[in-house]
Image: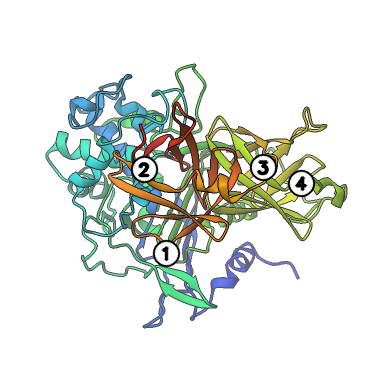
Amino acid sequence: MKLSITKKVDRLFSEWDKKNSPGCALAVVRDGKIIYKRGYGAANLEHGIPISPATVFDIGSTSKQFVAASVALLARDGKLSLDDNIRKYLPEMPEYKYAVTIRHLLHHTSGIRDYLTLMALAGLRYENEYPDEEIIGLIAQQKDLNFPPGEEFLYCNSGYLLLAEIVKRVSGSSMRAFAEKRIFSPLGMKATHFNDDFSTIVKNRATGYAADNGGFKISMSIFDVVGDGAVHTTVEDLFRWDQNFYNNSLGGYGQGFIEEITAPGSLNNGEKLGYAFGLFTAPYRGLRMVCHGGAWMGYRAEMLRLPQHKFSVICLSNLSAMNPTTLAKDVADIYLAGLFPEQKDRSTPEGALSSSFHKADLKGKSGLYFSAQTAGIIEFTEKENRLILEISGTMYKLAPGNRSRFTCSGNRLYAEFKSPPLSACNEVLICPERGRPAVYRQLPPVHVNSKMLREYAGEYYCAELETSYRIAEEGGKLALGRKNCPKEILTLAARDLLKGAWMSLAFTRGRKKEVSGFALGAGRVKNIIFLKSGGQ
């Protein structure tokens, strides 16, 4: 018996379509109408409240497009220029060697370090005990950038926090009030707001959850910073926002406004990015796709638009283990079957082993790899005829497509090994779904002894984070201690290079070859300097 389209969609979400499970709300949009909407699972497990299309969710980074649109409105109002130096509005920011502009913040090309990563490194909890000024002060305390502005793309939450502050200072209104007046109210988005006070009672809000020992635990934010996230909304309200991209009614600026906020940015060398104003732009199976996901605490979100077919999928979840991005694409595949210029290769089910795969293809690929480009360390391990890739504490299960290329389920990234190897060590190109590819070189095994480990033991201080790290030798291993964090075992990846769970420490030496400090790298933060107590 042939299943209907809606039955096929419901089957995608059947795992969560239960009274005792968190789930998601879904809206499918085509030609100006919601053609299918429903909820799956529970909005609140304690009271047995089901999810519906009117349920309110925290949409995390999907919020960024509303901050970007607010900045674009102010620019069209003549209140600011996108090419203004941000110090015009944020004089507390350092005067870096190169000017950082509002446009750099919008496109994640500023080089400014990510504040959420900085907070984690400084041992600051994501709790409502720091005023906005203190968080901005932490960003302003950084004396260096990850890279010169405009030279690279690196997703950065700091940029959108600073953009929200610029909106506040230029308009004289909070980000919440400005967005309500200029975007949400004009579009009739009555259930939408920037939640700048976690203690506010939000009608119809879903509780956020995370998996816990075969069940679930509450995972909610008590952090009031807005800009990089914090919009609370429904799939029905986001439909109204979605439709404004086809017939703009904001600010009286017509479709020119939409063209501006969906136009990809570019690097200094002219290379086009896959990022516009708080929106990713990328091809999907031969069609242009405009989208942005979100992830914060127990919430996950995706809003995906295929303008050529006036088709969108909005999926908002209250379970951190869900992947609305993959699910939204699966929904699109069902509704637009046969309409994509590039069809999926279904000869091998996703995640299954290729018929050309040989176990020997995995030989020699396990181990640690270092990239001078990212200053990061990754690790490959072999398990059940798969390669497991660890990047900054996140695990990706890779299936081999051929003898040199391994792909993550959902095509979020792939790893391509140089074959045949050009040297005694493997080199691998890591290509993330979003961001720039980077080459990593395999590190040879290190023969560790106690004398070598003791060289790195000691107390280290970072002025930019105002915190100390302590490294100690314990039972033939190095243990890292830092504020508000459990003890962490460090791995000696190479001489003067240590790997933590999600960070790398590249050590420096003084004139007498003694260890003097280290430069820390952690994904969206590069080259944070720690000096050893008594070092120069």
- Give the Cα separation between the discs numbered 2 and 4: 36 Å
Residue positioned 64% across, 55% down in the render: 334
- Decide: few, some or many residues near mark 1? Use Cα within 10 Å; few <14, some 14-19, many ≥20: many
Q: Which residue is mark 3?
A: 414
x, y percentage for residue 227? 29, 45
Q: Does label 1 or label 2 sit earlier along the sequence?
A: 2
Q: Which residue is mark 4?
A: 345
Q: Secondary structure at mark 3?
A: strand
**Total number of numbered discs in the rendering:** 4
Residue closer to the observer: 81 or 490: 490
Q: Which residue is mark 1?
A: 298
Which of the numbered marks, if any, corresponds to residue 257? Answer: none
Q: Which residue is mark 2?
A: 157
**Which picture quadrant has residue 95?**
top left
**Residue closest to the far top:** 269
Q: Amino acid at mark 2?
A: Asn
- Give the Cα separation between the discs numbered 1 and 2: 18 Å
Specify whether residue 344 is in view: yes
Q: Does label 2 or label 3 sit earlier along the sequence?
A: 2
Mark nearer the viewer, 4 or 1:
1
- The quadrant in which the C terminus is found is top left
Residue closer to the observer: 8 or 382: 382
117 left or right, relative to 380: left
Residue closer to the observer: 196 or 40: 196
